[in-house]
Image: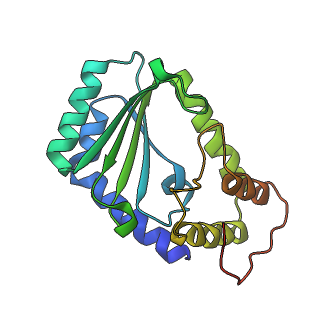
């Protein structure tokens, strides 16, 4: 994977947002497109969105989900209420996982979180810490590693990329690399 793949996927994401999705999201708060899109590290079709609202509104959140379903026609949407579940490593807020098909076959997955400003702060700070440490060489290495991980048949079945505050070995390795330590990217295939 290379910079061209990131640019192509970001352009696809822009089209998806421009299809009316961004206009819908804007009706529900302050919208932040985060994660790999924001960091120019896209390797697969996964778009992370965080909406900040002063007060969470479950009724409005389900209205948002209905409007997204009407626009994008996803075969599956997953709902979480982390104000109740309080899963370690996840923001205290409401979540829609929007699946536009089988992501392993190239379909888009959209993660939408709605939290208050305090709930967004850790996510924002995490992204900024990564951005500050990215260089052209670490970006290329990360894109290569993510590409290998994505193609691995055990990815998302036996291992994953972690959560906001509970990273996996993959996330720790990438963070170690962007923190200024060297990492040799091997020509050997990744094996979990």
What residue occupies the far left of the structure in this picture?
70
- Decide if residue 116 is in sight here: no
Color theme of the render: rainbow
The quadrant of the image that shows the N terminus is bottom right
133 with respect to 159 (left or right): right
Q: Residue at x 17, y 47 (%)?
A: 71
134 with respect to 11 (left or right): right
Q: Please tell me which residue lies in front, 148 or 49.
A: 148
What residue occupies the far right of the structure in this picture?
181
Q: Quadrant of residue 115?
A: top left
Instruction: Report the number of discs.
Output: 0
Q: Residue at x 45, y 25 (%)?
A: 93
Where is 92 relative to 112, above or below?
above
Q: Please tell me which residue lies in front, 3 or 61.
A: 61
Q: Position of residue 157 (x, y in %)?
A: 51, 56
Q: Residue at x 37, y 53 (%)?
A: 109
135 with respect to 78 (left or right): right
53 with respect to 156 (left or right): left
Q: Quadrant of residue 95?
A: top left
Q: Position of residue 52 (x, y in %)?
A: 43, 28
The quadrant of the image that shows the C terminus is bottom right
Where is 155 relative to 23, above or below?
below
What residue occupies the far top of the structure in this picture?
55
Q: Quadrant of residue 124?
A: top right
- Decide if residue 130 is in sight here: yes
Q: Position of residue 178 (x, y in %)?
A: 75, 58
Q: Residue at x 41, y 67 (%)?
A: 9
Q: Position of residue 20 (x, y in %)?
A: 21, 48
């Amino acid at each position: 994977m290379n910079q061209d793949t990131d640019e192509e996927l970001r352009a696809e994401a822009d089209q998806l947002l421009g299809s009316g999705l961004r206009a819908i999201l804007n009706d529900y708060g302050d919208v932040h497109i985060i994660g790999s899109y924001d960091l120019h590290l896209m390797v697969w079709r996964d778009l992370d969105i965080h909406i900040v609202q002063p007060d969470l509104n479950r009724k409005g959140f389900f209205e948002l989900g209905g409007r997204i379903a009407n626009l994008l026609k996803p075969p599956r949407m997953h709902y979480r209420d982390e104000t109740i579940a309080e899963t370690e490593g996840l923001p205290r807020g409401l979540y829609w996982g929007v699946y536009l098909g089988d992501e392993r076959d190239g379909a888009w997955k959209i993660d939408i979180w709605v939290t208050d400003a305090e709930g967004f702060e850790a996510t924002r700070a995490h992204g900024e810490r990564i951005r500050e440490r990215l260089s052209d060489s670490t970006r290329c290495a990360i894109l290569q590693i993510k590409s290998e991980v994505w193609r691995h048949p055990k990815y998302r079945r036996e291992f994953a990329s972690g959560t906001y505050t509970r990273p996996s070995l993959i996330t720790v390795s990438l963070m170690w690399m962007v923190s200024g330590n060297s990492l040799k990217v091997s020509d050997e295939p990744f094996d979990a």
